[in-house]
């Protein structure tokens, strides 16, 4: 190999190394830092904005979800799971593109982290089963921390989560933790008995006894993310509605 060819080869190799390094720095340092900053900003906005009831007492104070919807009208509510990093806005897209927010953030920008999003057609105020999805991200964001519920001890210490929207805050108590590939996404039921059997099946599939029971009269919310015990497996944390304020 001539000296000139060697020089060209070395320059090309160096270019590849630099390009690869820049790619990984952007993907694993710059992008996560930007995501953290954006999430922190919207969390602060959510925490500081007055609730709807307080807003009604003052015409100058918009409720927090009116404020959040100015960022993105697809924001439906806010999910908080104590003991985890899960403290995020919940998005919902049209039925024509139900998984849109699998690849888009809460500002509707393309992002592999996606968003926490609600199954199309669900309405927590009326749906018997409301299903929320989020990615299991290696950097610990989105629904990664749902895997903490593999531990019965963690569940006992953190037995509830909350969902808030413009109608108020709803508290859910966890009654099952499931490892499942499918069968939990149903939101339409033929009868009370059909729904009761669905809830009973969820409890039977729980990986441990939570000490909490649910029945066909409950409204439930399922938090779902990927887990990798088997191909296409999901971790599903199931909660029943306790109260709404």
Image: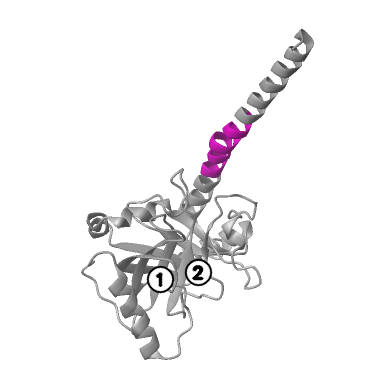
Q: Above or below — where is 85 with respect to 238?
A: above
Circle 1 SS class: strand
Magenta range is 22-37
Residue 242 is at least partly visible in this image: no
Q: Is residue 98 left or right of residue 197?
A: right
Residue for point 24% across, 71% down? 212
* Marks 1 & 2, CB-CB < 8 Å contact: no
| Residue depth check, mark 1 versus mark 2: number of the one nearer the observer | 1
Q: How many marks?
A: 2
**Colour approach in the figure:** one colour
Find residue 142 and name its label.
none
The residue closer to the viewer here, 148 or 219, is 148
Residue 242 x, y percent position in the rendering: 32, 73
Residue 99 x, y percent position in the rendering: 59, 64
The residue closer to the viewer here, 166 or 173, is 173
Q: Where does label 2 land, which residue?
A: 166
Q: Is residue 15 left or right of residue 171?
A: right
Labels 1 and 2: the sequence-earlier one: 2
Residue for point 36% across, 90% down? 193
Picture quadrant of residue 9: top right
Per the model, the C-alpha gap separating discs 1 and 2 is 17 Å
Q: Give the quarter of the figure containing the C terminus.
A: bottom left
Q: Is residue 122 magenta?
A: no
The residue closer to the viewer here, 65 or 205, is 205
Find residue 221 and name its label.
1
């Amino acid at each position: 190999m001539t000296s000139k060819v060697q020089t060209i080869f070395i320059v090309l190799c160096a270019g590849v190394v630099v390009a690869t390094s820049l790619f990984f720095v952007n993907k694993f340092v710059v992008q996560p830092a930007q995501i953290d900053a954006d999430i922190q900003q919207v969390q602060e906005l959510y925490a500081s904005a007055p609730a709807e009831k307080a807003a009604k007492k003052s015409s100058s104070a918009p409720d927090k979800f009116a404020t959040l919807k100015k960022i993105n009208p697809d924001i439906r509510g806010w999910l908080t799971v104590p003991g985890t990093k899960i403290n995020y806005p919940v998005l919902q897209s049209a039925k024509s593109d139900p998984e849109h927010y699998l690849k888009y953030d809460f500002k509707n920008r393309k992002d592999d982290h996606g968003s926490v999003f609600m199954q199309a057609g669900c309405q927590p105020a009326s749906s018997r089963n409301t299903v929320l999805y989020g990615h299991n991200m290696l950097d610990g964001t989105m629904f990664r921390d749902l895997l903490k519920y593999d531990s019965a001890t963690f569940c006992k210490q953190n037995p509830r989560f909350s969902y808030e929207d413009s109608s108020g805050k709803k508290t859910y108590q966890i009654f099952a933790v499931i490892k499942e590939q499918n069968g939990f996404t149903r939101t339409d039921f033929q009868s009370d008995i059909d729904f009761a059997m669905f809830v009973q099946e969820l409890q039977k599939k729980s990986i441990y006894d939570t000490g909490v029971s649910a029945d066909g009269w409950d409204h439930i919310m399922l938090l779902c993310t990927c887990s990798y015990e088997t191909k296409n497996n999901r971790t599903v944390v199931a909660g029943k509605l306790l109260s709404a304020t």
